[in-house]
Amino acid sequence: MEGVEMSEFWREKKVFVTGATGLIGGWLVRALLDSQAYVVVLVRDWDPQSELIRSGLINQTYVVNGQLEDYATLDRAINEHEIDTVFHLGAQTIVGSALRSPLPTFESNIRGTYNLMEACRVHDGLVKRVVVASSDKAYGDSDVLPYTEDMPLIGRHPYDVSKSCTDLIAITYHRTYGVPVAVTRCGNVYGGGDLNWSRIVPGTIRSFLAKEAPIIRSDGKFLRDYVYVKDVADAYMTTAEALDNPEVRGEAFNFAHEQPRTVLEVVFAISRLMGCDEIKPIILNQAKGEILNQYLDSTKAKTFLGWTAKHDFDQALGETIKWYREFLGA
């Protein structure tokens, strides 16, 4: 994967990835395959537009069909493939979907997590490292920013609560049963392959390519971290490699670019790079169930893992715009 140094650590490691058809999952699988890992992916729905399938990467993996809510599927995947490393990215990730229909979000994000953690506990003779993807949303709303890892997890809205629970369940399985887990908490992840057009980066790029005004659901002043998907894939692999260190097990780590931006700043940056300054966004100011300001302190990841983001914002946005131009045939 261009821009990320591959590690010999992963050669012939047997890796199980949930959420492999998602934005981060596709890039993580690519990096693992580039590092010559043996990759097993959990696939619930066949989405031919997902990066994993569209790129043909799925043909280099071993596919387990099923869903996180089915414990037997997870148990079989780990046992039959003799998995030593687990990346748990699978989740319902859309805030609006969680708000409209919380039950499927809780089933996937909460039940799915404890099912997977239990399968890892049962097969502790095989599983040596587990990375669980949480989110900055797990912290909930706070007047104290940036978030640091010692702050409480107090999600209030359905998606936020599901990520708080994911986080706590993972740590519980380490503290109680010794499962070698670390939790990752990222800001807003962007990059090529994100087909959730309601998100600000892909939605804005698609609008500008069509010479249309992008739609902003909020007032445009929400403040967020934006971290490039290649940097996130690198963060997950770096965390997994460090799990051989007892000081890393049972810990959570924030990963962010540490340059928070408003929604409008992101839209204007995309506009500038695409030469669409004359097209002004439409601001609806209708967002509900979302936290106003969220951004992270990544000092702990720098200190314990030696991780920092390798891509600057304009470079990463430029790569992202190029991906969507090619994908949309623009």
Image (cartoon, helix red, strand yellow):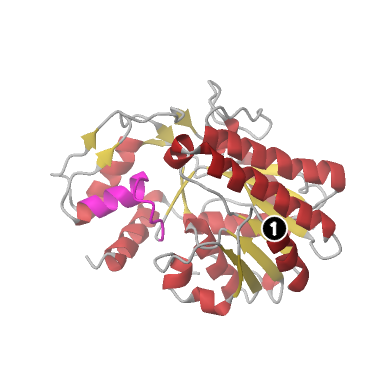
Towards the viewer: 101 or 268 = 101
177 on left or right of 330: right
Determine if residue 2 is in view: no
- The residue to which callout 1 is attached is 240
Asked whether residue 201 is drawn in magenta, I would say yes
* Residue at left offset 67%, top offset 56%: 70
**Position of 299 relative to 207 (above/below):** above
Q: Which residues are magenta?
A: 193-207
* Residue at left offset 70%, top offset 58%: 240
Q: Amino acid at mark 1?
A: Ala
Q: Residue furthest bottom?
A: 59
Quadrant location of residue 216? top left
Expressed as whole percent of the image width and height from the top left, the position of residue 239 reads: 67, 54
* Residue at left offset 38%, top offset 31%: 222
Secondary element under disc 1, as helix, strand or loop, is helix
15 on left or right of 271: right
